[in-house]
Image (cartoon, grey):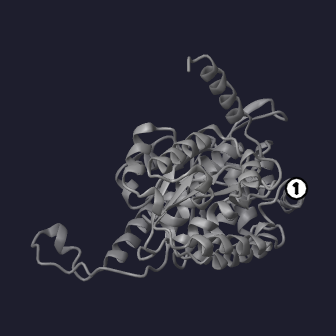
Amino acid sequence: MILNFETNADHSNKSFSLDFLNTISKKFHETINREDIGFFQLTENKEHLKSTKIIFEKYKDRKHFVQIGIGGSALGPQMLIDALGKKDCGKTFTFLDNTDSEYISDELSIIDPKESLFYVVSKSGGTAETMACFAICRQALIECGVKEEDFNKYFVFSTDPVKSDLRDLANDKGFDALEIPSNIGGRFSVLTSVGLLPALFAGIDIDQLYAGAENIKKTILEDASLDNPLYRAGAELAFAFIESDPKVNQTILMPYSSKLKSLSSWFVQLWGESLGKYSEDKKTNTGLTPIPAYGATDQHSQMQLFMEGTNDKFLFLLELESKNVDFNLQNSIGKSSSDGLNGYTLNQLMEAQLHGTIKALRDRERNICHIKIDKNNEYNLGALIVFFESLTALMGHYLFVDPFNQPGVELGKKYAYEFLSKKSK
């Protein structure tokens, strides 16, 4: 993975000084070595791979995979399947990730519940939206003639190993249950059983996901310098957020790949839920609002704003240097717009669109980071996941917030239950 920056940063600033980078590095190392934070060490434990493969072998003949979860219990797995899922895997995938009755009805109407595996994912085991969809799927099985005592043949849980309503139900009723480690939050959980089981059903090589994650960790743990992509990205973002004029307060992840479109949605939750906080140290609300985008589609929508709107954004532009297929654009349409494509391929057009955009953004002195990976595969996606998770943890130190809690989300849940309790049953 290669990162090239074009920013307005003054590299003499303290954000780029060796002493400051060493201080931030020390804090980052303290964070990733805390017992209550496990995302960085996760891929060292191959037991997650082994236990997930055992469950996959037991249910691999099911035609439909239905993931019941919300937030990190759906966004990460959806991203893996969109990016790497094999079209010839012979499975269909459904994500019940909302409490929208019309959506759920539509999704359940096109599958056979008796040919399905329902994967109920909730670390706490009591997420209201997840339990609601769980109840609906139970009823769908009953309507197909499945008896309640046979539900353990259709449902698998992914939840906390110790304290969880789903864990209790698994122990009482004999459901298979995989672990979400207690020290890993939902938005950091894509490389746990949360994402690994659906990945296996989609024909994804989960061993290579872990290999890529382990490889980028070696780079991240190198000396604190601007040659380290993690510290360079953190310093550039910190300068843009703290000292640029105007200050940057928005972050865009824009992969030039339709298959990686969902990577941006996964990033939005990771970044927004982790860094949008009230800072007790600074006594102020803070954050870097994440914006999802993908190229070249958003060159014809959001890019106008990114290019000429307020210069308060930092763009990560992700390039795939090669793809498995290409199309020759040779044609006899006979118009100047089409004649200009003769002699080129579709991949060359995408490359030209990306590099043209980068040059235009440079001309307007926009803050950008151009990321290159050689191709979209398990190894590189595992590396990207851990890189952005690590950058999120690092930015917590720059913004003086705890990136591993979500008090604003919890408050909304509290009020939702209060509202529901006032409704007549």
Q: In the visual, does 46 lie left or right of 98?
A: right
Query: Residue visible at 62% across and 63% down?
Result: 195
Report whether residue 366 is seen. Answer: no
Q: Residue at x 20, y 81 (%)?
A: 330
State the quadrant of the N terminus: bottom right
Indicate whether 32 appears above or below 165.
Answer: below
Horizontally, residue 128 falls left or right of residue 163, namely left
Q: Is residue 200 left or right of residue 236?
A: left
Q: What element carries label 1?
A: helix
Determine the residue positioned at 64% across, 20% down.
Answer: 421
- Look at 89% across and 61% down and name the residue there: 33
**Residue 88 image offset from top left, x and y in percent:** 41, 77
Query: Residue 409 at what x, y percent from top left?
Result: 67, 35
Q: In this view, does 387 lie above or below 20?
A: below
Image quadrant in which the C terminus is located = top right
- Position in image of residue 204 (x %, y %): 55, 75
Q: Which of 192 and 403 is in front in this view?
A: 192
Q: Quadrant of residue 280?
A: top right
Q: Which amino acid does label 1 sit on?
A: Lys
Which is nearer the eye, 361 or 354?
Answer: 354
Instruction: Please state the total of marks drawn on the protein image.
Output: 1
**Residue 329 visible in the displayed image:** yes
Question: Which residue matches tag 1?
Answer: 27
Figure quadrant of residue 407: top right
Would you call the spot at circle 1 few (<14 residues within 10 Å), some (14-19), or many (20 or more)? some
Camera-side residue of 145 and 45 = 145
Q: In the image, residue 219 lies at what x, y percent?
A: 75, 74
